[in-house]
Amino acid sequence: QVQLVESGGGLVQAGGSLRLSCAASGRTFSNYAMAWFRQAPGQEREFVAVLSSNGARTSYADSVKGRFTISGDNAKYTVYLQMNSLKPEDTAIYYCAARPAVWVPTKYSEYPYWGQGTQVTVSS
């Protein structure tokens, strides 16, 4: 059973930073792509960033490029999302997702495993 547990969300002022963490357990994740998605109230869940299984490739949504960085610690089976220069429009529930893959999936429907989400609120 794959389990993903997010942490690190909270309330921050615009321009501030947060680092989200996603701890994975249940199996070996060396061949898993790990991603972050977010969902704001009344909106669909959208892709934010993904890290390839070997850690060599990343992909970001245009809205977060240059501000967010995804990284991973294979020894700890943990993936991080460093979020800088936060904006009010970044307010959402952030979800961690995982799937076996050698590419970098960016679609919600491509991920079978999800965490419970962590709330990020950016005040203006």
Image: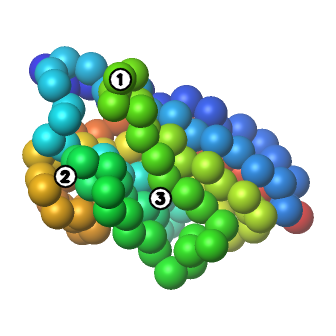
Which of these two is toward me, 46 or 106? 106
Q: Do we see residue 9 in this rendering?
A: yes
Q: Is residue 35 left or right of residue 43?
A: left
Q: Amino acid under label 2?
A: Tyr
Residue drawn at 42 percent across, 61 percent down: 49
Residue 111 circle label: 2
Q: Earlier in the sequence, mark 2 or mark 1?
A: 1
Quadrant housing residue 8: top right
Residue 115 circle label: none
Q: Which residue is mark 3?
A: 39
| Labels 2, 3: front one | 2
Residue drawn at 55 percent across, 30 percent down: 7
Disc 1: CA contacts within 10 A as few (<14), some (14-19) or many (>=20) = few
Residue 75 image position (x, y, % from top left): 35, 23
Q: Is residue 71 left or right of residue 55?
A: right
Number of numbered discs: 3
The quarter in which the C terminus is drawn is: bottom right
Residue 17 image position (x, y, % from top left): 76, 50
Q: Amino acid under label 3?
A: Gln
Q: Earlier in the sequence, mark 1 or mark 3?
A: 3
Quadrant housing residue 25: top left
Q: Secondary structure at mark 1?
A: helix
Q: Amino acid under label 1?
A: Ala
Disc 3: CA contacts within 10 A as few (<14), some (14-19) or many (>=20) = some
Residue 75 circle label: 1
Residue drawn at 56 percent across, 74 percent down: 65
Q: Is residue 113 above or below residue 26?
A: below
| Labels 1, 3: front one | 1
Residue 69 image position (x, y, % from top left): 55, 57
Q: Earlier in the sequence, mark 2 or mark 3?
A: 3
Q: Secondary structure at mark 2?
A: loop
Q: CA distance from mark 1 to mark 3?
A: 29 Å
